[in-house]
Image (cartoon, helix red, strand yellow):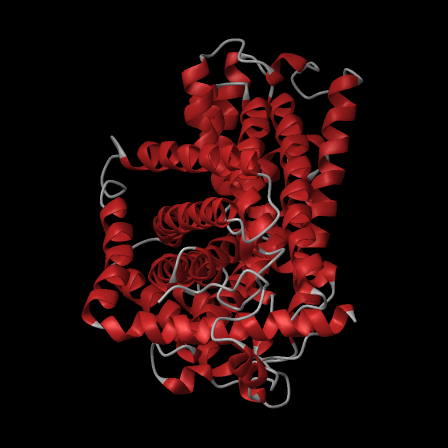
Amino acid sequence: MDVSFCADGSPPGGSAVRRQLEQPLPDRTRAPRKLRLWEALALSVGLMGPTLAMGLNGAGVAATAGKAVPLVFVLGLIGVALVGYGFWRLTQHFNHAGSVYALAGATIGPRAGFFGGFALLGTYLFFLTCTLAATGVFAHAFLQALGIPAATPWLVVALLAAVAVGLLNSRDTRITARTLLIVEGVGIVAMAVLAFVVIGRVAGGSAPRGQTLDLSVFTAQGTTLGAVMTATVFAFVSWAGFEACASLGEETDNPRRNIPRALVGSVLLTGVLYVFLMFAQTIGFGTDEAGVAEFAGSEAALATLSEQYVGAWFALVIAFTAVASAFASALSSSAAAARLVYALARDGFGPARLARTSPRTGAPTAALAFVCAVAAILVAIVAGCGVSAFDAYYWFATIGVLCILVAYAVAGAGVIAFTLSGRASIPKYEIVLPIAGIAYLGFVIFTQSAGQPAPFSYFPWIAGAWCLAGAVVLLAAPGLAQRIGERLTAELAAQELQAERSAL
């Protein structure tokens, strides 16, 4: 069963169905619309974790592309913009707690929607797990910077973080959004201060090793175009999770305006920040061979530059913001994962109790407890096998990125189908953008999968198995797609009616 509307925009089935849909869905299925634009934007920024991205992802780019790190992030911004176009267009018409699940379901059909949503659920669960591990990593690093021996195992820190994100997310969604805004805001301000100090000292000739202001970092000088394009994969993952605000479509005021704006805002805000910070880091370490090697080998680039350019006290500030950013990313990941589980359970996949919400806050508390428990179990398993927190972070992050690439491709196919269907006034020539986005995603998947050493060579198989499990569920339960289609039709038609009422 496909999810579509009649030529006049009415739900299929005629006036009888329309009259039935005039009645609102039960209270338990829909949280009140109360989030504003900046609060929705905070969820996407929180899931991306710019403080973490800037502290960890630059080294991999420098190791591959040399001093052309800022150029790589400019190209990465173009790539994520091509992918983000599909979400921007679709959220102008559809808003749902299931994000890709509903966007693809409404444009391609319920089977594609479930497959894309299941891939996205894997992403959010793996991201939640990796950010819990990252909280343990940076908490230990911060304690060591203070001179305090970190005797507590990282697993204990991760489990405490899981409990904390569950408690915070079970409260009013606005509290989560404001917590994310404060935490990431402090981190962004700290990074910006560091960048201005680094650029100022380099431009003023007072850099520690005489580093110079080298604008050739925005060219491929000293490297190859192939190396630059390969390195864009490391840059692209810095934006993974930019679409998280789409899962707040049912809780945001005027979602057809605010969710697309939040998507654009999250990509542009972090894009400008990433390019600026990467420029500062590159010239801060130096663009000569020794500087590039130091950057590529740094596991805490921002802390290193802080100590070199400002002082040990500022390195402590950066170390603390890293702990807070890891926790904020876990908070955002759990919020997005819970809403997707809630949406799937509400539409017939999984126990009905996972669709329960708090009567006081509207938060999907049952789904939230479920995703936090799953992430805690995964963390406990890898810790019990002797895996370090740092490795656990990278392992689960890699699997999550591979899953999200599949979800992004499904969303891109959805906007292509929606454009060609003529159901919206989208110029047909714009399909070149999602096509280019899907092609770039294919390149990223290939680069992330081919020629990787163990254990990273196993991760594409794990991500593929997760996505395949979604397809197997559909084959094993043929009635599931029909139930999903019927439910999505009712929900999206109700949104159409609500939008019409608001316009009157």
- Residue drawn at x 47%, y 21% as measured from the top left: 228
Task: Please tell me whether residue 416 is drawn above or below residue 35 in the rendered image.
Answer: above
Horizontal and vertical percent position of residue 338: 48, 71
Horizontal and vertical percent position of residue 501: 73, 74
* Residue 480 in the figure: left or right of residue 169: left
- Displayed quadrant of residue 497: bottom right
Horizontal and vertical percent position of residue 62: 49, 25
- Residue drawn at x 59%, y 63% as measured from the top left: 8
Q: Is residue 440 visible?
A: yes
Q: Is residue 162 visible?
A: no
- Displayed quadrant of residue 215: top right
- The quarter of the image holding the C terminus is bottom right
Q: Nearer the viewer, residue 301 or 39?
A: 39
Q: Residue furthest left?
A: 476
- Residue drawn at x 23%, y 40% as measured from the top left: 457
* Residue 341 in the figure: left or right of residue 53: left
- Displayed quadrant of residue 252: bottom right
- Residue drawn at x 45%, y 82% as measured from the top left: 355
